[in-house]
Image (cartoon, grey):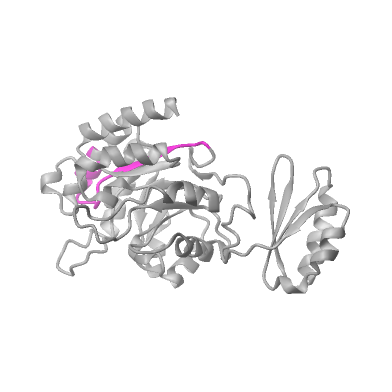
């Protein structure tokens, strides 16, 4: 249920109403806009007399929200959420490019790639220290050493870092990581999501391999329900019957997620297609569809990459793409 409060209502009046609602055993989440305030009521709202609430002088409208996801719902929070990572902002008209190798392979590799993508216009650095792989015999990442190399690349370039977590027990290793990524395979690891919800760090949540947008947003709700609203949604393609690409890029998810939720939405054309030659057209399409950012894999030697070399751009190809994205955004 939401209650839209009239424009000239004082903070004291809003606090008084909030206290009364909370006395009924219902949580209240306030969203303050330029022209209105929205109170989102979460819990057993059957305890609230909807007609009584609607009759109050300070209340403009009251309506029930049928969607199971509440806190990430745009109805609860009409204005775009802007996630801040240091000096970088994502959402609400702010655009960011996250770039770097699929996996951290060495100190030298990370610093070299970090310097090249920063020079081309990337604003955050990605790299996998822990790598979930389909085969147990594939390269699983450098783990704690990988995070250390990422931090060294951050120190060398000043770029905030993004890396994936596999287990809540690893959280102490992520204290200096700027954005914690939840990969597609862990999108419905609810215990992990709840633990991440207790942190204040920005969370980059990737859509699962075959999950609906409703399920995707419910995973974001798990994080928000524990108090962390710093969430970036990432469309990274879903599994369909098509075999020519690694996954099928769901461009329609970008405007739909913006319609359903106030959270920023970025796209990962690298994992979505699995082919480096398709990264540029899918990146451009994502920007045209309204993405708040892109996540692109860049490797200084894709042919010898330990992970996902086929979908990685060279630094020169990334610089070319970044230039085209800049021009496209100017037109848009």
Residue 122 in sight in this render: yes
User: In the visual, does 19 lie left or right of 162?
Assistant: right
Q: How many marks do you count on the picture?
A: 0
- Does the segment drawn in magenta span residue 105? yes
Tell me which segment is drawn in magenta.
93-112
Residue 225 locus on image (x, y percent):
57, 65
Q: Quadrant of the N terminus?
A: bottom right
> Does the rendering let one see residue 198?
no
Give me the residue at 47% from left, 46% from top.
255
Which residue in the rendered view is the most extreme toward the left?
A: 304
- Side of 193 relative to 299 (left or right): right
Task: State the residue lying farthest toward the front.
Answer: 241
Q: Position of residue 135 (x, y in %)?
A: 18, 68
Residue 107 coordinates in the image, percent (x, y): 22, 46
Q: Is residue 275 above or below residue 184?
A: above
Q: Nearer the viewer, residue 148 or 75?
A: 75
* Vertical relation: 108 (above or below) 271: above
The quadrant in which the C terminus is found is top left
Q: Quadrant of residue 284?
A: top left
Q: Is residue 4 magenta?
A: no
Q: Is residue 63 left or right of residue 180?
A: right
Q: Residue at x 21, y 66 (%)?
A: 134
Identify the residue shown where x is 35% and y is 61%: 184
Q: Where residue 42 appears, x then y in whole percent?
A: 67, 66
Residue 88, compared with residue 310, is above or below; it is above
The one nearer the camera, 330 or 170, is 330
User: What residue is shown at x 39% (from left), y 70% (from top)?
Assistant: 169
Image quadrant of residue 51? Answer: bottom right
Does residue 316 lie above or below 81 as drawn? above
């Amino acid at each position: 249920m939401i209650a839209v409060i009239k424009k000239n209502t004082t903070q004291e009046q809003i606090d008084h109403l909030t206290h009364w609602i909370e006395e009924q055993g219902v949580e209240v989440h306030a969203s303050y806009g330029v022209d209105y305030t929205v109170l989102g009521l979460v819990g057993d709202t059957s305890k609230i007399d909807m007609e009584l609430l609607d009759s109050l002088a300070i209340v403009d409208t009251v309506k029930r929200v049928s969607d199971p996801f509440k806190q990430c719902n745009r109805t609860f929070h009409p204005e775009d959420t802007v996630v801040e990572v240091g000096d970088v902002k994502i959402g609400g008209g702010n655009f960011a490019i996250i770039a770097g190798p699929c996996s951290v392979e060495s100190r030298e590799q990370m610093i070299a790639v970090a310097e090249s993508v920063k020079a081309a216009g990337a604003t955050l650095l990605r790299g996998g220290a822990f790598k979930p792989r389909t085969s147990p015999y594939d390269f699983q990442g450098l783990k704690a050493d990988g995070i250390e190399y990422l931090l060294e690349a951050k120190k060398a370039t000043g770029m905030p870092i993004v890396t994936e977590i596999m287990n809540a027990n690893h959280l102490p290793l992520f204290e200096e990581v700027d954005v914690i990524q939840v990969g597609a395979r862990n999108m419905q690891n609810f215990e992990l999501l709840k633990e991440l919800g207790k942190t204040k760090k920005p969370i980059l949540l990737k859509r699962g391999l075959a999950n609906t947008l409703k399920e995707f947003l419910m995973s974001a709700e798990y994080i928000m329900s524990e108090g962390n609203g710093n969430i970036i949604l990432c469309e990274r393609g879903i599994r369909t019957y098509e075999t020519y690409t690694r996954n099928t890029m769901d461009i329609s998810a970008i405007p739909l997620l913006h319609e359903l939720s106030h959270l920023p939405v970025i796209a990962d054309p690298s994992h979505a297609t699995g082919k480096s030659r398709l990264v540029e057209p899918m990146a451009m399409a994502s920007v045209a569809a309204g993405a708040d950012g892109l996540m692109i894999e860049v490797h200084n030697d894709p042919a010898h990459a330990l992970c996902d070399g086929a979908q990685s751009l060279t630094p020169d190809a990334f610089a070319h793409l970044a230039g085209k994205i800049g021009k496209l955004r100017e037109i848009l």
